[in-house]
């Protein structure tokens, strides 16, 4: 059985591309040196796959920043403001990705968006009314030839025309439909050019077709490929899908002249069922995505081989494939020196997944694989005991009742009580939690990690920082204070380290966007709180002030979404475990005199399933109750806040209200405040703090500007429900701009209060 890899990570095992790119941005190396690094990386990655015996190896999966931006560039989709900088090609590309400020001009970057249900972000191409879509650029062919020169025949991959049309933003009056002919022509040219280069297989990535498709969408897809595919004569086209199943268009695509179709058997719940029901043509190759490209657990060989056999028994020609690009998992276990073998034996990162593909392909050819030693060792892994259960946790979970998900009394009554107890002014001012992480803060944390200072020194430093931060906030005149989060770097890492059941890696980086990588923790076992996590910091901070100190936690959904989840228990169960751990912390904070507790759910929105029909049953139906479980045990007077980074929750507003928090803060300063209309339409009950300024830029908002934003907000939000705050944490900001911005914000709050008072 042949094997295929949809795409391979490109940042380098030790993030070589990141460091080289950043040096290039700082002008410490020139473009040749950067190109050299890139070439070396490509060579390594191809050879790694070749040596592992992969049959279908991708090329053009390399990218200096993002593959959607690469495809846009290939199609000539470059907005005028970037063209007009007249920069060299590579710099125009980086200008779109990161913005440009220099001799040639001053332009902001294109927007960035989450790549489907992953934590990878793509650059959103912009099509202007006068954009001329046409094939330009040679990247695909150059990289193909580069691999060929190394003796490796590759399948170039490119984002397909349908997905491209879906992902672009149309900034003028024209819409996607106006560009169909042009994009079709460009892809026709692309295929012809591949024919000329004698490319045997070409992979079109079309993840957009795993989303809900209506009749028009299907028509559009057909229109594109009915026109494009006839150009392929000897070049075979692989339609590659991932992140779900193609239930809306399956019957169509199996009849279209693709030479191969790649289907996801991991996230595609309906994939098997579709094949069962409608069959799969024997003259096409089925690229069966059975090796998980998104998670780090070893493949269950028995299940996979049984599936392969089921498919082959139907006469289907199977190529064993990853379920999506390996971009979403770290490179290799080889760099993990601290994880014990007991753990490591259960994991497969990208390189280890190549070994799995090979082993599975060999086993699949055996008459009786069940006696093979390779098979048996995998079999034993899954039948043996993994040492990951905690009886106490399971017992606690089993004792949860429906009442534990309900906070009493109802919110409107709590809100009245809280107004009395907390005694805050109208339109209370607050921040989202973190304060600038200046160099000394980072140095202190890092010295402590490296054992260069004692715990006492570490704590003393942070206490001094907290004291300064409290004094600073009092001076600015904020109403609800925070301790500043100086003890945290990445919030999920911070909580994960304090919880039982989590594992941490050393070098297991995954690209999040451009040069930014993250190192998600692994949920190994049942999760529980080992000891109080934040209580000491919050209690100390509260002791310094008469104002209300807000406790600061991360919620269960976010902790889970930013980790590699378990595969042996359901997401629902894992989230509930984490919720119980956070609940313990909430109750401890309350017992220790903290009256307001914020539970951040920054990542709640991002894992919303790709299909609308799954939103509730597959996610919100347990994610929202899990959040409620964290806070349902507090007294009515204790005020629960939550925070979300984006305001893109227009279509799930009832679910957000159903979290039953007392206050929610979110990012609204960059959007057009449309969200507020939707809140109103949905009779949103939670008090709201729509961020009044953008913390992602060092720009200081003026008092007038904030006042104006508040005035608009007041036309849409009930007067007694409005909070005033920045749109996210301040950790990435500098001290001077933070001081000025918060000062202006507090001043704007004063003005609006007196204005409203005089109007009464
Ligand atoms: N409390 C966190 C902070 O202020 C929230 C971070 C986030 O929303 N991403 O940094
Ligand atoms: Zn945020």
Image (spheres, rainbow, N blue to C red):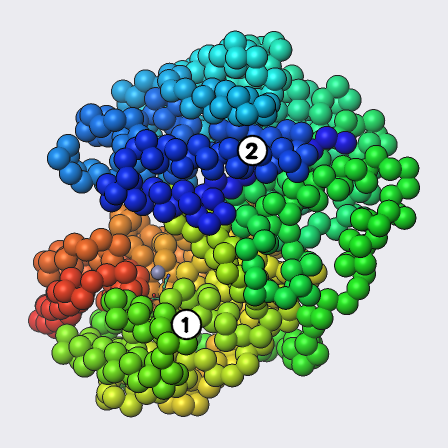
> How far from the left and from the top, in percent, is residue 80?
23, 26
Left or right of 56? Residue 406 is: left
User: Secondary structure beneath disc 1?
Assistant: loop
The residue that disc 1 covers is 450
In the displayed structure, would residue 332 be above or below residue 636? Answer: above
Q: Of the numbered discs in the image, which one, if any, rests on residue 581? A: none
**Residue at x 39%, y 33% (from the top left corner):** 36
Task: Give the percent coordinates (x, y) of residue 711.
Answer: 17, 59
Residue, x 80% and y 54% (percent of image)?
Answer: 377
Q: Percent from the top left, x then y, of residue 594?
A: 37, 85
- Tell me which image quadrant ligand 2 sits in: bottom left
> Callout 2: 10 Å neighbours few (<14), some, many (20+)?
many
Dot 1 crowding, Cα within 10 Å, few <14, some 14–19, many 20+? few
Name the residue located 48 percent from the left edge and 16 percent from the top edge: 190
The circle drawn on residue 46 is: 2
**Figure quadrant of the N terminus:** top right
Asked whether, in this view, residue 414 is left or right of residue 252, the answer is: left
Does residue 637 lie above or below 156 as drawn?
Answer: below
At x 18%, y 81%, the residue is: 471
Precedes in sequence: disc 2 or disc 1: 2
Residue 452 in sight: yes
Instruction: Answer with the quarter of the image where residue 357 lies.
Output: top right
């Amino acid at each position: 059985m042949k094997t295929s890899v949809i795409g391979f990570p490109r940042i380098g095992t030790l993030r070589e591309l990141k460091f080289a790119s950043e040096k290039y941005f700082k002008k410490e190396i020139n473009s040749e040196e950067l190109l050299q690094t890139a070439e070396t990386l490509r060579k390594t990655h191809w050879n790694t796959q070749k040596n592992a015996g992969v049959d279908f190896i991708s090329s053009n999966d390399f990218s200096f920043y993002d593959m959607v931006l690469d495809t846009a560039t290939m199609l000539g989709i470059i907005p005028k403001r970037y063209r007009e900088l007249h920069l060299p090609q590579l710099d125009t590309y980086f200008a779109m990705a990161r913005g440009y400020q220099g001799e040639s001009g001053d332009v902001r970057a294109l927007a960035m968006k989450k790549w489907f249900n992953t934590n990878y972000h793509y650059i959103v191409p912009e099509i202007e009314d006068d954009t001329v879509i046409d094939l330009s650029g040679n990247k695909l062919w150059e990289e193909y030839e580069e691999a060929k020169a190394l003796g490796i025949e590759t399948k170039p991959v490119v984002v397909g025309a349908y997905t491209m049309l879906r992902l672009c933003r149309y900034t003028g009056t024209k819409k996607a439909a106006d560009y169909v002919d042009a994009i079709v022509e460009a892809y026709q040219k692309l295929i012809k050019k591949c024919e000329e280069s004698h490319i045997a297989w070409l992979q079109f990535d079309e993840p957009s077709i795993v989303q809900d498709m209506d009749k028009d969408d299907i028509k559009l897809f057909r229109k594109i490929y009915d026109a494009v595919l006839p150009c392929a004569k000897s070049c075979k086209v692989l339609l590659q899908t991932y992140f779900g199943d193609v239930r809306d268009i399956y019957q169509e695509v199996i009849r279209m002249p693709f030479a191969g179709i790649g289907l996801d058997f991991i996230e595609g719940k309906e994939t098997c069922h579709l094949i069962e029901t409608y069959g799969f043509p024997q003259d096409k190759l089925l690229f069966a995505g059975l090796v998980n490209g998104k998670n780090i657990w070893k493949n269950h060989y028995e299940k996979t081989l049984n599936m392969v056999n089921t498919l082959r028994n139907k006469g289907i020609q199977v190529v064993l494939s990853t379920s999506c690009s390996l971009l979403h998992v770290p490179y290799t276990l080889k760099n993990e020196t601290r994880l014990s073998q007991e753990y490591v034996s259960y994991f497969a990162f990208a390189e280890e997944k190549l070994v799995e593909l090979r082993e599975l392909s060999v086993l699949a050819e055996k008459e009786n694989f069940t006696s093979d030693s390779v098979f048996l060792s995998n079999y034993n892994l899954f039948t043996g005991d993994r040492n990951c259960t905690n009886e106490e946790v399971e017992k606690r979970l089993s004792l949860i009742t429906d009442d534990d998900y309900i906070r009493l009394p109802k919110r409107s009554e709590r809100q009245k009580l809280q107004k009395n107890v907390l005694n805050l002014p109208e339109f209370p001012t607050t921040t989202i939690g973190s304060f600038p992480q200046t160099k000394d803060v980072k140095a202190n944390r890092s010295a402590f990690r490296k054992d260069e200072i004692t715990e006492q020194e570490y704590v003393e430093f942070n206490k001094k920082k907290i004291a300064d931060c409290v004094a600073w906030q009092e001076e600015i005149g904020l109403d609800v204070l925070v301790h500043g989060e100086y003890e945290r770097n990445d919030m999920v890492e911070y909580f994960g380290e304090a919880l039982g059941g989590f594992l941490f890696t050393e070098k297991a980086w995954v690209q999040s966007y451009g040069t930014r990588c993250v190192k998600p923790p692994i949920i190994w076992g049942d999760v529980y709180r080992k000891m109080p996590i934040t209580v000491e910091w919050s209690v100390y901070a509260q002791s310094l002030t008469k104002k209300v100190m807000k406790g600061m936690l991360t919620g269960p959904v976010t902790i889970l979404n930013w980790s590699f989840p378990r595969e042996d228990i359901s997401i629902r169960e894992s989230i509930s475990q984490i919720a119980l751990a956070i609940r313990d912390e909430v109750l401890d904070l309350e017992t220790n005199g903290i009256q307001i507790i914020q539970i951040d759910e920054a990542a709640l929105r991002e894992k919303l399933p790709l299909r609308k029909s799954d939103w509730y049953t597959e996610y919100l139906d347990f994610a929202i109750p899990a959040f409620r479980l964290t806070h349902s045990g507090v007294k009515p007077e204790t005020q629960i806040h939550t925070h979300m980074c984006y305001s893109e929750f227009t279509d799930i507003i009832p679910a957000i209200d159903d979290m039953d928090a007392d206050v929610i803060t979110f990012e609204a300063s960059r959007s057009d405040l449309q969200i507020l209309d939707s809140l109103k339409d949905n009779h949103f009950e939670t008090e709201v703090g729509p961020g009044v300024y953008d913390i992602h830029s060092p720009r200081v908002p003026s008092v007038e500007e904030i006042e104006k934003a508040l005035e608009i907000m007041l036309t849409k939000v009930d007067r007694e429900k409005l909070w005033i705050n920045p749109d996210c944490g301040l950790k990435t900001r500098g001290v001077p701009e933070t001081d000025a911005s918060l000062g202006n914000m507090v001043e704007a709050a004063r003005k609006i209060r007196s204005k409203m008072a005089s109007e009464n």
